[in-house]
Image: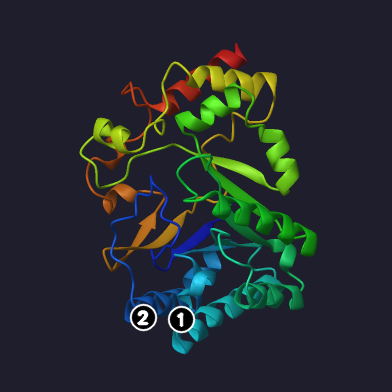
Amino acid sequence: MGKFLQFELWKNCHVGCKFCFNKYQPTSNTDDKLVALNKMLYVLNSDEIDEYDQVGFIGGEFFGGQLDTKEVKDKFYEGIDIIIERMKQNKINRFYIATSLIFDLNPEFNYFLQKFIEAKVLKRLMICTSYDIEGRFKTHKEEQLWQMNMLGLYEKYPMLPIHTQIVLTQNFIEHVLDNSFDIENFCNKYHTYIDYNIPHIGYDYRDKAEFDKLVPDFLPKRNDFPKFLHKTVIEDKTIDINRLFKPETKADVMYLIYINTIYRIVNKNYKTVLPFGLYNKSGYIDSDIKIWDDVNTFKEELNE
């Protein structure tokens, strides 16, 4: 696998997850979107693109009405056409696009997929979505819509890869430990594979305690995490400890919009852009020990 270039084109999102770290970010209007799309097109037409064999787009929700003017839509698909042409030339091996899948599978989304079908590169497109037991879906109907779309996509496009992100929250850990959430059954049912995110509280809270009052059972308890690892890695063999928190969908370079400014982030060094202290607000609710340290300790014990 080579290098991965990602574009976060805008942050507009209709999902409204309780724990979203972008929830108080300003949304992009048409002019903002055009600035981001023009930057994307500039990079895709430059020599820089030759460094990468994977490219990804993050919204917003592109297919939830956000390609809302002809100029925005035309420039978005101009970028898609460049990427597809490079896929046909085997210069790009994989294209990732993020979507909530909390919308009716509309003509816009089907039009997007049809471009990859006609170019015979659909199996090298990857749909990147997210699922969380608590906090992501505002209603049970939204969760049912996500489930229906996952099943419907596989039925109609069985060769289309779908990747799912789950935040490793205390709530999720408890559901796995008491067997009310079965990782293997979930992956088999929805024809997906899971990557996990370390939970953090975002930009807009003073500390973990303040956040925990508003979103309880989000940040994990340190005592439960080794139990989770033992069950999923050793007993059930549903998590590869060597891939945990190391998703293939993490970019080497990202063009990111933050407070209406475009930044180029290299080697995942978001600290050059994100507010100071963010990375002290991740991990456990009851310990300042880093989750990464406990993962490495677990790996060392496995290898003894």
Name the quarter where the C terminus is drawn: top right
Badge 1, how many Cα within 10 Å: few under 14, some, many 20+? few
**Going 54% across and 71% down the picture, which residue do you hit?**
63
**Which residue in the protein does label 2 denote?**
30
* Number of numbered discs visible in the structure rendering: 2
**Which residue in the protein does label 1 denote?**
68
Badge 2, how many Cα within 10 Å: few under 14, some, many 20+? few
Residue 302: x, y in percent? 60, 16
Element under disc 1 = loop
For residue 207, what is the image quadrant? top left
Q: Is residue 148 left or right of residue 211?
A: right
Look at the numbered discs 2 and 1 and tell me whether their residues touch, using CB distance below 8 Å: yes
Figure check: 289 above or below 152: above
Residue 121: x, y in percent? 73, 69
Residue 92: x, y in percent? 63, 66
For the residue marked with disc 1, what is the amino acid? Asp
For the residue marked with disc 2, what is the amino acid? Thr
Residue 1 in view (yes/no): no
Towards the viewer: 41 or 107? 107
Q: Is residue 215 left or right of residue 94?
A: left
Figure check: 132 above or below 127: above
| Extreme-bottom residue of the structure | 70
| Extreme-top residue of the structure | 304
**Going 65% across and 78% down the picture, which residue do you hit?**
111
